[in-house]
Image (cartoon, rainbow, N blue to C red):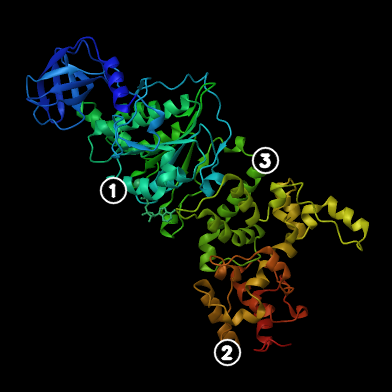
Amino acid sequence: MSVFASNIINEVNRLQDYQVYGRVTAIVGLLVEVGGLQGSLSIGDHCRLRGRGQKGVLCEVVGFRDERALLLPFGTLGGIGLGCHAEIGSTDPSVYPHEAWLGRVINAFGEPVDGKGPLNTGEAAYPIHRQPPNAHARRRVSDKIDLGVRTINTFLTCCRGQRMGIFAGSGIGKSTLLSMMASQTDAEVSVIGLIGERGREAREFIEDYLGEEGLSRSVVILASSDEPPLVRRQAAYVMMATAEYFRDQGKDVLCLMDSITRFAMAQREISLSAGEPPASKGYTPSVFAELPKLLERAGPGVDGQGTITGLFSVLVEGDDHNEPVSDSVRGILDGHIVLDREIAERGRYPAINVLRSISRVMPDCNTDEQNAIVTQAKKYISTYEDMAELIRLGAYRAGSDPDVDQAIRYYPVLEKFLGQSKTESCDLDSCYEQLAEILDMQSVLHPAATEPEQPPAGQAQGESAQQQQQPVVNAPASAGASPLSAAVQGLPQSAVTQATAAQQVAQPQPSVQPADQTAATPPAQSGDQAVMKEAETEQGSEPQPVSAQPLVAQAPGELVHPEAAETAAEPAPMPVTKNAVTDVVIDADVQELPPEVAVPSETSDDQEIEADTESDPEGTP
Ligand SMILES: Nc1ncnc2c1ncn2[C@@H]1O[C@H](COP(=O)(O)OP(=O)(O)O)[C@@H](O)[C@H]1O
Ligand SMILES: [Mg+2]
């Protein structure tokens, strides 16, 4: 049977036995009052207003006042006047999804808008205002879903049936992030709602990001910002009903919606028109009632059904993450991905702030090892960001705090890891491998696989046994084990730090600022400039371009791999004192002195400067 014939049969089966009419009694703005039908209508029902010689305007009941039904139109009210007929339409608006909807772009009424011909309709009605499954009957969120975005797969791992929000101000990359997920996910079906956003973006999204392959396993529901609020709101319901259809077929569905804020705005327009008083920032109470009704429909199904994993973008107005819609949505969902304008401005996309984002189910769905790696990575980022200002100013001296040194060491590679171009893909397993590798934590991810290698035949057995007992602390970094590994494997951090501080923490220094490169290092700024001046007057000669912060000066661009640090020449001993600024001067000189001339750390500032002037300009003893 042709698509056309089967659609006609389905339509005929759905026709009602009789038709009831009312009449238009008033029109104010877009709000139409209809009399005579109030007893037969309820909120959310559809009516068709018959204008003079017109096909009719579809409306929805949004309220009642003085024994009249209040209707808002899905289109324009041209041709509608007082006394026009109002026919009762569907009392429970439904769509009839079908497998053949995959690969198609439809509107808020389930009609095709992609010019690819008629659309098959299914036999089962899916009411657009469907209730979510009973909370007790629902399965729990289960295994992980691959969303193709490195940062999300590792730092914000999602499970099938989880619901997440992507929170950001305008132009930070919400839509792009959603499109990356749509094209790279391993979900069987994607249902994508482009709701209330720019119409221009829709084609870009479908043609450039989704592509033929991505579209063939997706249904796109489209309602651009210029459409009436009822259409925009209904598109969200149709999106959810379509996702429910595929979920009921046992499929794991990824439901992407851009954006939930536009849905809330549409609801605000509708309820304000119906005379509901605004509550917070112009949003009416019904907005906050509708949000959970919609969002709760995503999630796992009951036994025998699939899941709907939901990712909803939230436009944070004025970058205020506590504005009412953001606040409300954050409370409903199982996690939030926060995009940061400051990160986007420095050119790292996706601009996910991993410290402010959270996936509430992640700790349970990950292994302990994976959680340990992610926790360690977050610790580096957090430590670095706490110190970022000081580091940039050159006021932090390498060696003062082992944690900060480690953070400076790993931050650039972590930043690189967090960035991802629009077309790059990264699958779930390799994401963790990559993260473990850049943090030298493969031993944590694969404890058995990275046992220390057997020593060469000539080596003593006893030494080998000792290595096996303390594999992490004593193993060289090249074997994949580091003090970090020890820390996450349960050893006290302090013990690890003490045991390895001199050898491990100081390692990056020689490789980033070998003595013979000191002169080439760019002059230090701000606080260091004062120090340079001081050095100049003391020596009465050319200022030694002391730079201070080997790691500081080079940290943002250059990755110092521990192995490289190991193979570099042995560094001169570095005094460790508490006065960072004075140390900056001393360090440069001490590196040029033989070890026996090195100034002990307790030496006062004056004494240190003296030692400084004693060294000749060439730095030879
Ligand atoms: N992964 C990315 N790689 C490169 N540029 C990106 C990426 N994500 C976003 N952008 C840039 O950010 C701009 C805004 O992104 P968009 O997704 O439209 O933001 P939003 O939906 O938050 O308004 C894009 O035009 C693009 O230039
Ligand atoms: Mg957008």
Is residue 373 depicted above or below 110 in this figure? Answer: below
Sequence-first disc among 3 and 2: 3
What residue is pinned by disc 3?
Answer: 368
Q: Nearer the viewer, residue 436 or 550?
A: 436
Q: Nearer the viewer, residue 359 or 527?
A: 359
Q: Residue at x 64, y 44 (%)?
A: 370
In this figure, which residue is indicated by the disc labeled 2? 540
Report the quarter where the C terminus lies.
bottom right
Whole-Å distance between the Cαs marked 2 and 1? 66 Å
**Which residue lies under the disc numbered 1?**
200
Q: Is mark 2 within 8 Å of ligand 1?
A: no
Q: Residue at x 56, y 52 (%)?
A: 382
Which residue is depicted at the point 47% across and 55% down? 421
Q: Residue at x 50, y 42 (%)?
A: 185
What is the C-alpha distance between the residues marked 3 and 2?
59 Å
Q: Hey, which quadrant is residue 296 in on the image? A: top left
> Which of the pair 490/541 is nearer the observer?
490
Residue 509 at x, y = what percent?
Answer: 66, 70
Please count the marks in the image.
3
